[in-house]
Image (spheres, coloured by chain):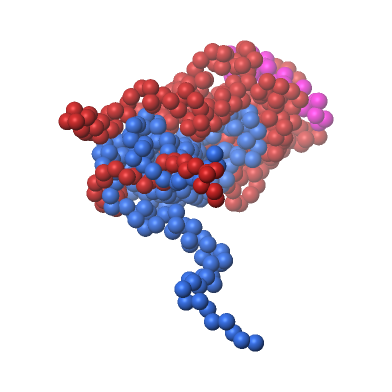
Amino acid sequence: MSSATASRRIRSGDGQWRGPTRPYDIAKEFVIALVVVSLLSIGLAALFSSPDEKAITLREWATNAPNDFSATVAAELAGTSGTATYGAPYVDVADAGQKIGPVNLQKWAGVRIPVDSAKQFVVDPLTAVSGDGETKDALAAWTAAPTDQQQGWASAYADAIAAAPDGDPAQAEAGDYGPVPVLTASMLSAAQRGGLDGPVALGGLFYQTDYTTSVLFLADGTYLEDKAVEQHLGGGQWGMMNETGSYPGQAWLWLYSFWYQIKPFNDEENTYGANADALIWAIMMLLTLGFVFIPFIPGVRDLPRWIPVHRLVWKRYYAQQEGTRVRR
Amino acid sequence: MTAIAPDPTVPAADPDSEQWTAKLRNRFFGTLPPEKLLPDRQPSYVTSWIYVFGVLTIAALVVIVASGIVLAFEGPQWYHVSGVGHFVNSLHLWSVELFFFFMVVHLWGKFWMAAWRGRRAMTWISGAIAFLASIGTAFTGYLVQTNFDSQWISAEARDGLNSVGIGAWFNVLNVGQMLLAHVAALPLIVGIIVVWHVLLVRHRGVVPPFGAEHLETADVEEARS
């Protein structure tokens, strides 16, 4: 290399500090930190314990909220439940799915976890547990009927239950509901006896690790949400970062949770509210990228220089520097 | 033919220097010699309590992993019903809360120090990614508790994940999938990122105070003028 055409540029950053140093035992520091944190964790666990509210069973749901349970069963049969109308990834529904502008990522992902809610949540479990002739006849009548007829019966019954006092099926107006009232009553009765938790969750299998159908069915009713709202876990209650009881939850999700509390995202009547989940995801991904790449964002990366919090961190260093200057 | 005797004044080339293993070793220990990997001195400005929060975060991670291994080994049929199991579950919860508290304080401290200065951008980025991966790991932990929390959080979270297409592959209602993510895949990812982050800190050193950058000289680059 020709010395006449080259220059040397010095950049900092290999950790070669040329200034004064002091002894620092990082191995000892780690051991002390581990002991302190272990004792703190043990102390907090002993003092405050932890929340562990039992999972809701279908038996509990059917016993404590029978009308909600029956309405959900009727909606599953009618194809009007939350799951039946959800869209991807469970069912193929035209125009379903949230959008970010014109982009419908939900629909693009496709129906990868297909769910037939009438069959998987009602007909199959009931077939597995039904013993009485009336239920068997109702199942046979349902299975033999064409789809339009099935939906006509179930929709009419779902409407009748919704119009009944307290949503009580026993007080629903008489009508042509086919086998749906029997199927609904049999489901309620089987669930109250505790006979449905297995068939719905296991789907006829012995081993199981996937509880998609159970949770989808449970979430189609209002019982789960009502219990969550009682515990301040609702989406509009900062629920994402809350925990059952008075325990700290996922406080680190505060910013994600924040968007659900404000307009236009907390109003499902407008486009932004209807697509809130997707839009908030997009906002959070942008903010996340910004967070990761702070070192390259002019203005943000300069804040620590402009707002001298660092003078607290390096108080002693700056005091020594000023002392040296004064002595000079 | 007459053999030419090697010149004793010229150092013999290392016959193994082309080996991948030798190259890897030379690269690693060239970048991180033992005195950098485990230093016994630090710059004199490293005196604030804020510097302790990085090591506290790692210590909390150790407690999380230890208590998590016991929980995963014994299973929900143990920690839902036994007193000891519930205590270990509580230990896991509180070490997670401490972990995030320490990590957030550490992050804010590093932000106000502008700790990315002096070619340390990757140190910041690796720390930020560790924070995000930890959020994902904690989230899957809530899903595999197999209690009311798990039911509600999975029912709610599926909407967010499904809305952007992720839920089609990452199914929060599938306990088996979430358990694999929580006890194996994500902790491994967090562990690797944390090791990467710590090695970067050791390699680049602790960022100097504003105005002291000139006391830290390093990579001398030849640049044509």
Q: Which quarter of the rendered picture does the N terminus of chain B lie within?
A: bottom right
Q: Main structural element of the magenta stretch: helix, strand or loop? A: helix
Q: In the rendered picture, chain B carries what hue?
A: blue
Q: Position of residue B116 (x, y in %)?
A: 43, 36
Q: Write the residue at 44% across / 54% down.
A: B31
> Can residue A58 be seen in the rendering of this structure?
yes
Q: Could you say which quadrant of the image residue A179 lies in?
A: top right
Q: In this view, does A76 lie to the left or right of B6?
A: right
Q: Write the residue at 49% across / 45% down.
A: B221
Magenta includes A94?
no
Residue B53 in the image: above or below residue B31: above
Q: Which quarter of the rendered picture does the C terminus of chain B lie within?
A: top right
Q: In the rendered picture, chain A carries what hue?
A: red
Magenta includes A148?
yes
Q: Work out which residue is located at the far right of the displayed protein and give it.
A: A146
Q: Write the residue at 56% across / 17% down.
A: A265
Report the span colored magenta. Answer: A145-173
Q: Where is residue A110 in the image (x, y as percent from the top left)?
A: 72, 35
Q: Work out which residue is located at the far front of the displayed protein and give it.
A: A4
Q: Write the residue at 32% across / 45% down.
A: A18
Q: Of B97 and B16, which appears nearest the observer?
A: B16
Q: Where is residue B143 in the image (x, y as percent from the top left)?
A: 50, 39
Q: Of A45 and A319, which appears nearest the observer?
A: A319
